[in-house]
Image: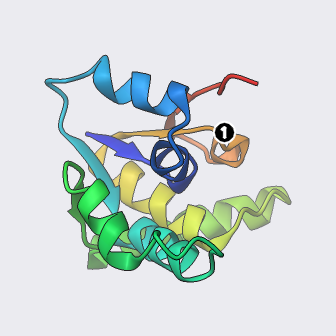
């Protein structure tokens, strides 16, 4: 399973070419994200100065993404991830921990431009480098 992180999805919404190209080049791929990531994007829409960006427009623009709810098993795996990161002295933000738990539980890959995910042991990460 391919899980898209908020960094890539937010850039997709902003029209950043690398994000659109990534999606277009994988037309037959089913993309997933966590309900936690949708919360981040919805909150971002409410926090913006652009009145054209709303929860509704974000949901519509990302209707092609399958949103996966955070399960009991995902939450348990996320707790393990957080414990591992704190033990290593390399914590990451809570939404990223929750996504990492869901992705690791599913045996998937997280697609992101956020290097924080590379700190998570045994997590498959596809780190994208956006154009400058």
List x then y, in percent, for residue 111.
47, 37
Q: Dot 1, crowdedness within 10 Å: few (<14), some or many (≥20)? A: some
Task: Point out the residue furthest to the right here.
Answer: 89
Q: Secondary structure at mark 1?
A: helix
Residue at position x 52%, y 53% from top? 10
**How many circles with numbers are drawn on the protein?**
1
Task: Point out the residue furthest to the left here.
Answer: 28
List x then y, in percent, for residue 91.
77, 63
Relative to 26, does residue 87 appear above or below in the rendering?
Answer: below
Locate residue 6 relative to residue 116 in the image: left or right: left
Observer-nearest residue: 56 or 7? 56
Residue at position x 58%, y 49% from top? 7
List x then y, in percent, for residue 16.
55, 35
Quadrant assignment, res 55 = bottom left
List x then y, in percent, for residue 51.
52, 76
Residue at position x 76%, y 67% from top? 86
Observer-nearest residue: 31 or 125? 31
Tag 1 residue: 118
């Amino acid at each position: 399973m391919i899980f898209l992180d908020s960094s890539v999805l937010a850039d997709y919404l902003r029209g950043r070419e690398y994000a659109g190209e990534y999606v277009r080049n994988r037309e037959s791929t089913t993309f997933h994200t966590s309900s936690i990531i949708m919360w981040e994007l919805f909150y971002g829409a409410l926090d913006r100065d652009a009145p054209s960006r709303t929860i509704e427009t974000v949901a519509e623009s990302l209707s092609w993404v399958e949103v996966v709810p955070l399960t009991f098993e995902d939450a348990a795996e996320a707790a393990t991830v957080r414990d591992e990161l704190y033990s290593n002295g390399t914590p990451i933000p809570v939404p990223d921990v929750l996504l990492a738990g869901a992705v690791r539980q599913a045996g998937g890959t997280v697609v992101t431009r956020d290097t924080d995910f590379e700190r998570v042991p045994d997590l498959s990460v596809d780190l994208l480098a956006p154009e400058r």
